[in-house]
Image: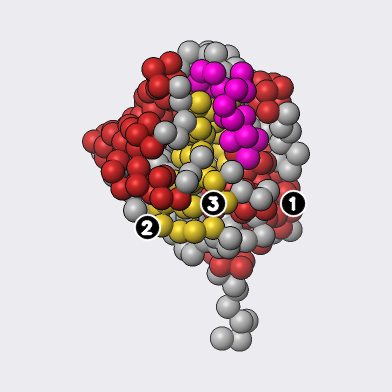
Amino acid sequence: MRVLVTGGAGYVGSVSVERLVEAGHEVVVLDNHATGFGSPDLTGAELVDGTYGDRDAVQRLLEDRGIEAVLHCAARSVVPESVRNPSLYYVENVQGGIALLEAMRLAGVNRLVISSTAAVYGVPEEVPIPEDARLQPINTYGETKRTLETAAGWYASAHGLRPVALRYFNVAGASERNGERHEPEPHLIPNLLTSVRTGLPFTLTGVDYPTPDGTTIRDYLHVLDLAEAHRAALEATVPGDPRTDGLLALNLGSGRGFGVREVIAEVERVLGQRLEVREGPRRGGDPPALVAKIDRAREVLGWTPERSTLEAMIGSAWAYQARREPAAPADS
Ligand SMILES: NC(=O)c1ccc[n+]([C@@H]2O[C@H](COP(=O)([O-])OP(=O)(O)OC[C@H]3O[C@@H](n4cnc5c(N)ncnc54)[C@H](O)[C@@H]3O)[C@@H](O)[C@H]2O)c1
């Protein structure tokens, strides 16, 4: 299959490109380098510079390359920034997303997998969260993802789009070639590893949540398991497959939740180093617990998050950071 991966130079996109190339698919990456940092290894794929928000250019690209399916990973995805600057998030994630849907419609491409997020649920009424839980996002980021999912559903009924929205929980870990790098880095595991490497203290953002250790509980998914889910979801969009006759929404997580103190203890155990931890106030807008119910992805895609142990995610992310920023020689 010939696949266009938007945001394929970013963290999730680059590891997914690796998996798709390995599975024998032809991959074109479209990225404008707005938020991806570093130089991902995209061996085997073609890299095109540009935005998915340019409808005409994307239509031409889809037609020129004979693209059959789109994996839409590109987005703005920093929650506090989305709350400060809703316009950027509506223009990029919604207006840009609709331009992409239009380009696909005009080019006659109807197979689509969207990177969505647990942020569409807001503060859930039940945990683990099933896909049919109410969608009530509490920040602009989650709202724009919900809007794009909904639009894809309407394009399905009006134009025969075959969309899958994959609602990721917390993605972590790295492949042998690509990994996570954001500036600023909003995610727990890379920030803990940076504290280990620099010796700077790590501050807990809230220790009075109604959870066993007082910190927020999150569900961590190995980026390699996510890449495999992308591959399986793209294959489920093939015309005639009843799974994608309308919008198919699937949670992707490990199905297990960990408090921040548990993740810290595991980082210390895996790396054999101690972290200096301080207690700070809540950030605001953080739900106490977000854990995925993943039965639907298991059943519908035949997918299992087999690599998503904290140990594997921490170990691979540590190896990736070390490759990127090798330790200075002791005597320099
Ligand atoms: N990382 C996570 O834990 C997580 C969790 C839930 C959902 N997601 C979603 O997964 C997707 C990928 O996240 P990530 O962590 O890899 O982010 P990332 O910032 O590393 O990658 C996004 C990529 O998209 C590109 N991009 C942004 N705007 C673009 C545009 N207009 N045109 C073309 N390219 C553009 C960026 O340059 C970057 O390379 C996002 O949609 C995000 O909302 C990520």
From which residue to which does the magenta span run? 231-249
Residue 295 can be seen, yes or no? yes
Question: For the residues marked 1 and 3, what is the alpha-carbon distance in whole angstroms?
Answer: 39 Å
Instruction: Give the residue pinned by disc 3.
Output: 27
Report which quarter residue 309 is drawn in: top right
> Residue at 53% of width from left, 14% of height from top?
133
Residue 203 can be seen, yes or no? no
> Residue at 57% of width from left, 51% of height from top?
26
For discs 1 and 3, the disc positioned in front in the rendered view: 3
Most foreground residue, 98 or 156: 156
> Residue at 38% of width from left, 37% of height from top?
107
Question: For the residues marked 3 and 2, what is the alpha-carbon distance in whole angstroms?
Answer: 14 Å
Local crowd size for mark 1, using a 10 Å CA cut-off: few (<14), some (14–19), many (≥20)? few
Q: Which mark is residue 269?
A: 1
Residue 157 is situated, as x and y percent measured from the top left of the image, at 43, 16
Which of the two labelled residues, at mark 1 and mark 3, occupies the earlier sequence position? Answer: 3
Residue 95 is situated, as x and y percent measured from the top left of the image, at 28, 34
Which of the two labelled residues, at mark 3 and mark 2, occupies the earlier sequence position? Answer: 3
Whether tag 1 and tag 3 are in contact, CB under 8 A, the answer is no
Disc 2, SS: strand
Relative side of 223 to 124, left or right: right
